[in-house]
Image (spheres, rainbow, N blue to C red):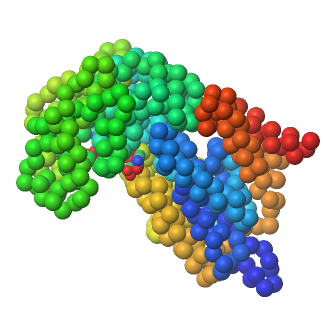
Amino acid sequence: MPDTERDPRPLRVAVVGAGPAGIYAADALAGQDDVPVAVDLIDRLPTPFGLVRHGIAPDHAKMRALRDTLHHTLDHERVRFVGNVEIGRDLGLDELRRHVDAVVYTYGAAGDRRLGIEGEDLPGSLAATDVVSWYCGHPDADRALVEEAVGRARHVVVIGVGNVALDVGRVLARSPDELLLTDMPQHVLDSLAAAPVEQVTVLGRRGPAQATFTTQELRELDHLADAVVLVDPADLELDPAAEEAAAADRVIARNLATLRGWAGHTPAPGRVGIRLRFHARPVRLVGTDRVTGVEVERTVVDAAGTATGTGEFDVVPADLVVRSVGYRGHPLPGLPVDGRSGTVPNEAGRVLRDGAPSTGEYTAGWIKRGPTGVVGTNKHDARETVAALLADAAAGTLRPGGDVDDLVDTLVARGVEPVLLSNWRAIDAAETALGATRGRARTTLHDRASLLAAARAAAAAVQA
Ligand code: NAP
C-alpha cells in the first residue's frame, strides 16, 4: 500500500463493468477516507449503468431513475468513467493489471442459460436476453432476429416464472400508448405497436409456490391498459408442502393471494390475455421451419420442491417463444469462470485462481455470486469486496502496478476511443434532445455509431 506521507500516489483500482455492482464498488472505494484512491470505472459500452440501462424494463421508470443516484459516483473526483473499452480486446487483462494495484471484476452475467430441449434453436425461439437487449436499445442487440419474430407474434410463450419473464410478458402485452412513456428506441416502439400479440402464456415448470417472481411485479400485470390476466384455478390447488411454504413465507403467501384473486377472470375480446400456467414443464419446442408451439408435460412437485412429470402432455401454440430461465456469466480472456455456476471463483470477493486468492484481483455483483437479487443487493455485495481489497491494501499484500502510462493515454495511443464523463454527458444530452423531438423525456440511442457521434460532439465542443 502506498505510504501517503512520503508518496501521494493513490491506490489505483480498475473496476471492470460500470453497472450497479461496479458503481457501488467504485462508490465504496471513493467514499472511504483511510486510503487515497483513484478508480477507473471501465465499461465495454460507451454508456454507464449496465442493467439499469439495458436490463430494467423501460416501463419501470421509477426503477430506471436509479441512474440519477448512481450518477453521483460517476461525478466523484476520485472516479473516472472510461467507456467504450473492452478488456480482453482493447487491453489485455495482464496489461490492465500492470496499470493498477487492484482490479475488481463487475461485468455481470450477460449470457442466457439453455433449456437443453429439442427445438430450442428453431426460428422464433429467442432468449430473454435477446428480447430485453432489443427493447432496452443495447448496441449489441440483434434487431433483425427479434423484429422478425415479434412481427409474427400472435401467440407468445414465455418459459420461466421469474421477474425477467414477467418483464418480457408485460412489455409485449402493453399498448402503444403505455410504451410511448418509456425511453425505448423509436424502432422498438414501432415494432411493438405493429406486433399482432393476442395471447402471452407464461410457463412455470413447478407450482405457484415455487415461482421466483415478486409480488409487486406480479400485481402489475393486472394494471395494463389492454390486457387481462388469466389463471386456471386448478393450478392453484396446493399440496400440504406448498401450504406450509406459503405459511412460512410472506412473498409466497402474497403471490398466491394475488393469483387467487385472478382465478375468476375470463378472456376479454380485444384485450391481450396473459395466461399464467404452472406445473407445465417444457419438453420440446414444436415446429419444422419455425416454432409453432411448446410441448409441455404436467408435473407434480414433492415436499423438497422437485418437479416430476406425470406423463400428461399437451402443446401450447406459439409463434414466438422467449426462454427466460436465467442468466449466466462468461469468462474474460485470462479470467477463470466456473463452468457450472457461471461465476468467478472467489472468497468474499477475493478472486481464487487454482483455489488460492490471487493478489490484487476481486469481484462483485452477478459475476461474483450469480444472477440473483435486486439492484440494491449489489451494494452490500460490493462493500464486502471492497472491504477485502482495502484490508489487503492495509496489510501490504497488494503488488503495486508499475508506473506505466496513464490507462487512457495507453488506450488512445493504440487507436481506442475511450468515452469519458464529458462524452457520456454529451450522449445523455443527445438522448434527451432526441426524445424532445417527439415529446418524450428521452429516446435511447441504440447503435454504437450514434452513441460515439454524440460522444465526439463533446470533444468538438471543448476544442471549439
Ligand atoms: P430467476 O428468478 O432465477 O427465474 C428463472 C426461472 O426460470 C425460474 O422460474 C426457473 O424455474 C425457470 N427455469 C430454469 N430452468 C428451467 C427449465 N429448464 N425449464 C423451465 N423453467 C426453467 O431469474 P430471472 O427471472 O432471470 O431474474 C434474475 C434476477 O433478476 C432475479 O433475482 C430477479 O428477481 C431479478 N430481477 C428483478 C426485477 C425486478 O425487481 N423488477 C426484474 C427483473 C429481474 P425453477 O425455479 O423451477 O428453476
Q: Give the residue furthest to the left.
A: 240
Residue at 13% across, 53% down: 242
Q: Nearer the viewer, residue 441 or 126?
A: 441
Residue 464 in view, yes or no? yes
Q: Is residue 104 above or below residue 256?
A: below
Q: Give the residue furthest to the right.
A: 464
- Would you identify the image quadrant in which residue 116 lies? top left
- Would you identify the image quadrant in which residue 22 lies? bottom right
Residue 16 in view, yes or no? no
Residue at 61% across, 38% down: 441
Percent of width and height locating residue 270: 31, 19
Residue at 54% across, 53% down: 66
Q: Nearer the viewer, residue 63 or 158?
A: 63
Count every numbered label the image shows and give the total.
0
Percent of width and height locating residue 45: 64, 43
Apparent side of residue 74 relative to residue 107 in the rendered image (left or right): right
Quarter holding the C terminus is: top right
Q: Is residue 301 above or below residue 229?
A: below
Residue at 50% across, 70% down: 384
Quarter holding the N terminus is: bottom right
Q: Give the residue furthest to the top.
A: 289
Apparent side of residue 337 relative to residue 318 in the rendered image (left or right): right
Percent of width and height locating residue 424: 71, 46
Q: Nearer the viewer, residue 304 or 137?
A: 137
Apparent side of residue 122 relative to residue 359 in the rendered image (left or right): left
Percent of width and height locating residue 105: 57, 58
